[in-house]
Amino acid sequence: MNISLKQRFHGLPAGFHLLMLSDVLSGLAMGAGYVSISWWVVTMGGASDMAWFSTLTALVMLVALPLTAPLGDRFPKNRVIAGGIVLAMLSGLTLAIMAWLHIYRLAWVVASESLAMFAWAIVIPSMLSIASELVPAARLSDALSLQKSSQSVGNLIGPVIGGSLMAIAPAWMALGSYALLLAIAAIGALRIQIPSRSLEHVRAESFIEQIRSGLRVRWRIPLERSWAFWGLLVMTAYFPMVATLLPIKLHQLKLPAFWLGACEAAVSGGLLVGSLWLTHRLLQRCSRPRARAFAMWSLGAVFLVVALTDHPLVMLAMFGIEGALLSITMLIGQTHRTLAVPEPYRARVSAINVLVAKLGGMLGPALAGILLTRWSLDAVYLFFALFHLLTVPPMLLLPGVNRFLNLSHEEVKDWYLKQHPEAFEPVAPAVDKLKQPI
């Protein structure tokens, strides 16, 4: 493991090391912030407020993503990331002040967190695609694996900090720590040095045309269109189990906020193990499609156990396993899908992937809120676990997905442009030169 890790680090530029540091700090802040805010809402407002909070903030992200997606293709990504993190910091400060003054109004909390959702809509597409500008295509798999690991390190520690502070200190202290961590992360992001590239062809497009082009690419490529549709159903089933129902379940079990932080940290610990070791070991023994199938079926089984158990230690173990399995599905798909898109389109196209996830993040909690008025919490949890399990076969049978995943990293580079040039019309000059005969 140590030799493999050193080999993956070797030769990567200093800018990528700074990106990893920024990822650690951002993950630390997001983990602490999620636990602190969710527990505050559940404690002060109950299950109904939590369902509304999850749904409305996801709706803000859903609207913001297509509007902000072109920023990463239009301006230097390090500045886009830093600017977005500063906005999220302002949201955290607002919530900390509200908690300090003992003010809790759901509308105000949603409004403040909506600013953070808008901020992350700016940050996430650039964060997902900036590695492709810092490292050569042959090293992108290693880079994305290490980036996922650095995010997991932050997400591993952040929830524990947030949960511990919410358990032993006033809410304003936990929320204030969230804002402070974001301020440090913004400084780290600004120090990332990315290679200069011409942005003239991007700025020549109108902002609206850039938004339309990202959507057009996803729609005109059959594999991506199918992946987006079924991915939406996966996310609709997934998000309530980890973002809406989990805090409610732990609160009903009369467990302290620490347990919510511990479950979130277990997911991140699993992601860390999966991205640094498990995924690579698994791919040495089987193909990418088989590894993906194993991970997706196993995830379905894990969520069934989470839905059926009330034992906190069993839940903790299941969320750790979930993180490891999640890293397999993410790393196998994300590397290929990133390389397959021409570089000038990557930020806006990555945003569409996040858009699909956030649409599920809106629909899932909304459905959970409706079902909670009619069914018990355990019944709702089991419904979403079975729903998630039913999405596995369609995801494994996407048209052409196995052929796509079996391509090497060199073969998959700009694959969508070669296979579906019509998806990128009108083609910008910087993209046009990438066309090659099939």
Image (tube, grey):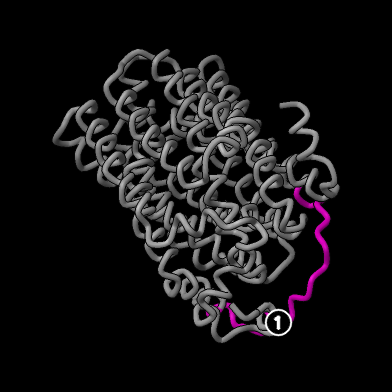
In the rendered structure, the answer to whether residue 275 lies left or right of residue 142 reads: left
Query: Is residue 52 visible in this depiction of the protein?
Result: yes
Residue drawn at x 52%, y 44% as measured from the top left: 287
- Residue 289 drawn in magenta: no
Residue 25 falls in image quadrant:
top right
Residue 340 falls in image quadrant:
bottom right
- Quadrant where the image shows the N terminus: top right
What amino acid is labelled 1 in the image? Answer: Lys
- The residue beneath circle 1 is 433
Q: Which residues are magenta?
A: 189-209
- The x, y position of residue 127, in whole percent, is 65, 53
In the image, 395 versus 180, the foreground residue is 395
In the image, 167 versus 235, the foreground residue is 235
- The x, y position of residue 189, in whole percent, is 75, 49
In the rendered structure, the answer to whether residue 421 lies left or right of residue 15 reads: left
Q: Is residue 288 above or below residue 372?
A: below
Q: Residue furthest front?
A: 285
- Quadrant where the image shows the C terminus: bottom right
In the image, 437 versus 105, the foreground residue is 437
In the image, 311 versus 138, the foreground residue is 138
Query: Is residue 32 visible in this depiction of the protein?
Result: no
Q: Is residue 353 above or below residue 242?
A: below
Q: Is residue 241 above or below residue 340?
A: above
The crowding category of the residue bearing disc 1, from other C-alpha atoms within 10 Å (few below 14, some 14 to 19, many at least 20), is: few
- The x, y position of residue 137, in whole percent, is 72, 58
Residue drawn at x 44%, y 37% as measured from the top left: 295
- Residue 202 drawn in magenta: yes
Count of numbered circles in the view:
1
Residue drawn at x 50%, y 73% as measured from the top left: 217
- The x, y position of residue 120, in whole percent, is 57, 51
As helix, strand or loop, the secondary structure at mark 1 comes to loop
